[in-house]
Image: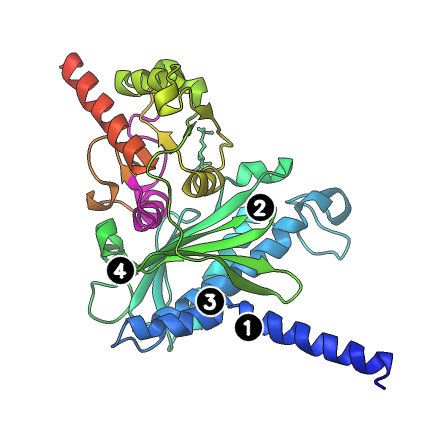
Amino acid sequence: MRKISDWFGIFVHIQIKITMSIVKTLGQYIIEKQADFPYAKGELSRLLRDIGIASKIVNREVNKAGLADILGEAGEINVQGESVKKLDVFANEQFIAALSVGGECCAIASEENEDIIIIDNEVSKNAKYVVAMDPLDGSSNIDVNVSVGTIFSIYRRTSLSGPGTKEDFFQRGTEQVAAGYVIYGSSCMLVYTTGKGVNGFTLDPSIGEFCLSHPNLQTPKLGAIYSVNQGNFVHFPEGVKQYIRYCQEEDKSTNRPYSLRYIGSGVADIHRNLINGGIYIYPPTLKSPRGKLRLLYECNPLAFIVEQAGGKATDGAKRIMELDTKELHQRTPLFLGSSDMVDLSGEYMKKYSEVKA
Ligand code: F6P
């Protein structure tokens, strides 16, 4: 007769086997997918791994944000006598540090830095890739416990060797090698594409690994959500106003009226719409006539992901990923999400710009 402790041992063994057979970590997945690129030497895989590591550290700090009263407000000296950094500054430093030691990236463009950051240490100065990022998008939401995110975009450098240059970033979104975002929400998730579909990984805090949770993400062709800062309505172009009126009309055959959902934290709004279907719009306004969002490190990577999931992204007329990048912090209007919705919003934009002209 077996003892209870034997049965317990067998049970634990089976559990471990089941866990091992169903969980695929980000690291395992990246290595497996390297075979999709026959000439790849593993640099991109290592770059993605470095981004994954930095995002785990940022997640840890974001999770502590509510403890500001105990640990000290940003800008103060905490109980350990260390100065407490604002989380967007902290996130920027973490990603720069991870990319600097990784050796696969020769320059970074960040929302937090006016100019590019050149990584010219011995291992990195001739690296093939440059990375554009928004280290903590929607950071004003942290104080009120709302999800925030990191957005990243990876390009092959265009300069041949030596330190990375600003011009290395002046490429169209269609040239992106990989792009992704991390959402620090009710769970922490990393979603990325290398141009062969989109996959989502959820951080399992018990093992400290991102695990494949959303393989081959596809966004619905038509959703029932529109996301826009409607407080700016009076300043919107006529095409956007009319499209919003369309979203609000009653029509059973098209499932209207749609729901308005706007968190004001771009990654969170876009992640929800990617999964459930919907459209996110940040149009030009009186205050921001060229739109608010940045082409290089917000719109292009989000457009790459959404297109890879079957959706679309435009500036109201042209495809986002075909716009010319001329400045690091260039802005553009953004219409992004389910393809039928982006197409229709474009038709409204066209129709009402013609009326004005
Ligand atoms: O890029 C900055 C950002 O915070 C996005 O994350 C968000 O979608 C947008 O701005 C919100 O802007 P507003 O407060 O003007 O609606």
CA separation in Å, label 4 and label 1: 44 Å
Quadrant containing ligand 1 reads top left
User: What type is the residue that disc 3 sits on?
Assistant: Asp
Query: Which mark, residue 50?
Result: 3
Q: Which of label 2 and label 1 is nearer to you?
A: 1
Name the residue at the bottom extreme.
1
Q: Report the quarter where the N terminus lies.
A: bottom right
Q: Secondary structure at mark 2?
A: loop
For disc 4, the marked residue is 165
Residue interval drawn in magenta: 287-312
Q: Amino acid at mark 4?
A: Thr
Query: Which quadrant of the view contains residue 353?
Result: top left
- Real-space Cα separation, disc 2 to disc 1, in angstroms: 27 Å
Q: Is residue 87 above or below residue 207?
A: above
Q: Is mark 1 within 8 Å of ligand 1?
A: no
Q: Circle 1 is placed at which residue position?
A: 21
Q: Amino acid at mark 1?
A: Ser
For marks 2 and 1, the one nearer the N-term is 1
Disc 2 versus disc 3: distance between alpha carbons? 21 Å
Label whose residue precedes the other's in the sequence (4 or 1)? 1
Q: Is residue 230 above or below residue 20?
A: above
Label whose residue precedes the other's in the sequence (4 or 3): 3
Mark 1, residues whose alpha carbon is within 10 Å: few (<14), some, or many (≥20)? Answer: few
Which residue is pictured at 34% across the width and 40% down the height? 294
**What mark, if any, has residue 185 been given in the picture?**
2
Q: Residues within 10 Å of mark 2 (few under 14, many from 20)?
A: some
- Of residues 122 and 300, the one nearer the viewer is 300
Q: Secondary structure at mark 3?
A: helix
Label 1 and label 3: CA atoms lie apart by 25 Å
Is residue 333 visible in the rendered image? The answer is no
Residue 35: horizontal and vertical position, in percent? Answer: 32, 75
